[in-house]
């Protein structure tokens, strides 16, 4: 029975592509940098553990330089994301497999780090939330599913879409990009293969060419690392450009647990050079709003007044501090 079951599974898998589809995909993979064999790692199954780890580390060291070459395009993407935020739009990440999981990870980190709504940055993965934990067979092959997943979150003209696919060919992502463009929104791609299909679909293409993986085709390695670093840059820089920091401090941190509560106290101390007691009192008076606590300590002005000034200055703490100090002078 076990053998029959395995034969049945293998037959089902072989039927997923007819010969033309198979040959087309084989040709696509053949031309992808991320799918080629790394000549430096043909001996992975022969070398010892330390040598193996050294080769992985040496390969990983390539990633930052590959991203450095992408900074102009990443900058363009950040500027477009900020424009979207300023119109009340959302940043949507979409991807399949590792790429989708990385998008979800970056999205869910934004609310506790920057006190934004969980709706402002959204990560969508092919196959839904269950695919975060377990691969959903065939989900990435459907362009229609990518489109439908955007429709299901009411994707609109003020939003901006980032399609993430190391290969640059994932049908699910391309389907989503096509839909986003059809309603006139800006689209951004993150891939690791130059001249990919996805890049031709998007307004801004971010392509970190990290080369062949240590383990052939395992794009959760260098390619995944590059994607994670780029996503960090997109979300962090966009939040900075919309007033979420002061100097280099996370002044919009959401104190939702003991560690973050103490972090908020420390941030207020660092920004104002006050002691822990003063910081804690100010946070309690401002309902744990670190920005207001900092302004209150530095200006000694009425909390309601400085709160209004903060709103007037678009949430930018430095500008608010300068305007309050000018009025006081």
Image (cartoon, helix red, strand yellow):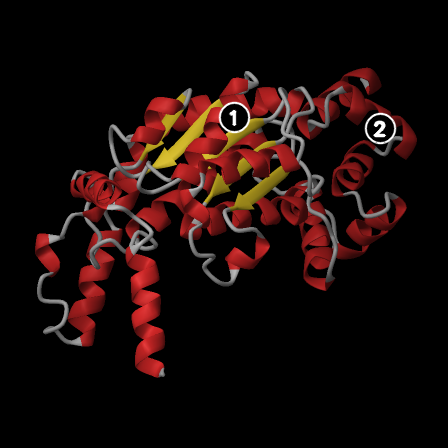
Residue assigned mark 1: 179
Viewer-proximal residue, 144 or 237?
144
Q: Secondary structure at mark 1?
A: helix
In the picture, the disc for residue 272 is none
Quarter of image, res 82 = top right
Q: Quadrant of the C terminus?
A: top right
Q: Which comes before the other along the chain, label 2 or label 1?
A: 1
Nearer mark to the viewer, of 2 and 1: 1
Q: Is residue 16 above or below residue 46?
A: above
Query: How far is disc 2 from disc 1 in space, using C-alphas?
Result: 43 Å
Label 2 Cα crowd, 10 Å radius (few <14 / some 14-19 / many 20+): many
Q: Is residue 50 above or below residue 62?
A: below
Q: Residue at x 51, y 62 (%)?
A: 133
Q: Quadrant of the N terminus?
A: bottom left
Label 1 Cα crowd, 10 Å radius (few <14 / some 14-19 / many 20+): some
- Left or right of 308 on screen, residue 257: left
Q: Is residue 208 above or below residue 113?
A: above
Q: Residue at x 40, y 31 (%)?
A: 189
Is residue 245 shown to the viewer in this render? Answer: no
- Left or right of 12 on screen, residue 296: right
Is residue 307 shown to the viewer in this render? Answer: yes
Quarter of image, res 286 = top right
- Left or right of 228 on screen, residue 285: right
Viewer-proximal residue, 206 or 135?
135
Q: Secondary structure at mark 2?
A: helix
Q: x%, y% of residue 326?
A: 77, 17
In the picture, the disc for residue 306 is 2
Q: x%, y% of residue 272?
A: 71, 41
The residue sitting at the bottom extreme is 1
Q: Residue at x 53, y 33 (%)?
A: 147
Q: Is residue 46 above or below residue 11?
A: below
């Amino acid at each position: 029975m076990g053998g029959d079951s395995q034969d049945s599974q293998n037959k089902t898998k072989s039927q997923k592509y007819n010969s033309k589809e198979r040959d087309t995909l084989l040709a696509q993979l053949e031309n992808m940098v991320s799918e080629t064999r790394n000549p430096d790692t043909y001996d992975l199954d022969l070398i010892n553990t330390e040598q193996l780890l050294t080769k992985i580390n040496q390969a990983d060291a390539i990633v930052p330089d590959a991203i450095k070459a992408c900074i102009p395009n990443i900058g363009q993407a950040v500027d477009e994301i900020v424009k979207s935020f300023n119109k009340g739009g959302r940043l949507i990440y979409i991807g399949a497999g590792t790429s989708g999981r990385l998008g979800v990870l970056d999205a869910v980190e934004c609310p506790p780090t920057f006190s934004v709504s969980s709706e402002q940055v959204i990560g969508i993965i092919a196959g839904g939330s269950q695919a975060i934990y377990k691969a959903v067979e065939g989900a990435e092959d459907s362009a229609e599913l990518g489109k439908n997943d955007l429709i299901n979150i009411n994707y609109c003209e003020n939003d901006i879409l980032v399609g993430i696919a190391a290969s640059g060919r994932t049908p699910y992502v391309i389907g989503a990009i096509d839909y986003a463009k059809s309603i006139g929104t800006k689209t951004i791609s993150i891939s690791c293969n130059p001249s990919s299909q996805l890049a031709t679909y998007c307004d801004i293409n971010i392509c970190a060419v990290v080369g062949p993986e240590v383990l052939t085709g395992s794009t959760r390695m260098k390619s995944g690392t590059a994607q994670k670093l780029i996503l960090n840059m997109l979300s962090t820089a966009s939040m900075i450009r919309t007033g979420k920091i002061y100097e280099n401090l996370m002044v919009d941190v959401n104190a939702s647990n003991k560690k973050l509560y103490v972090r908020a106290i420390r941030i207020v101390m660092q920004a104002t050079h006050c002691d822990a007691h003063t910081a804690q009192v100010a946070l309690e008076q401002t309902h744990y709003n670190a920005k207001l606590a900092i302004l209150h300590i530095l200006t000694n002005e009425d909390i309601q007044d400085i709160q209004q000034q903060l709103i007037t200055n678009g949430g930018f703490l430095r500008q608010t501090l300068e305007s309050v100090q000018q009025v006081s002078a």
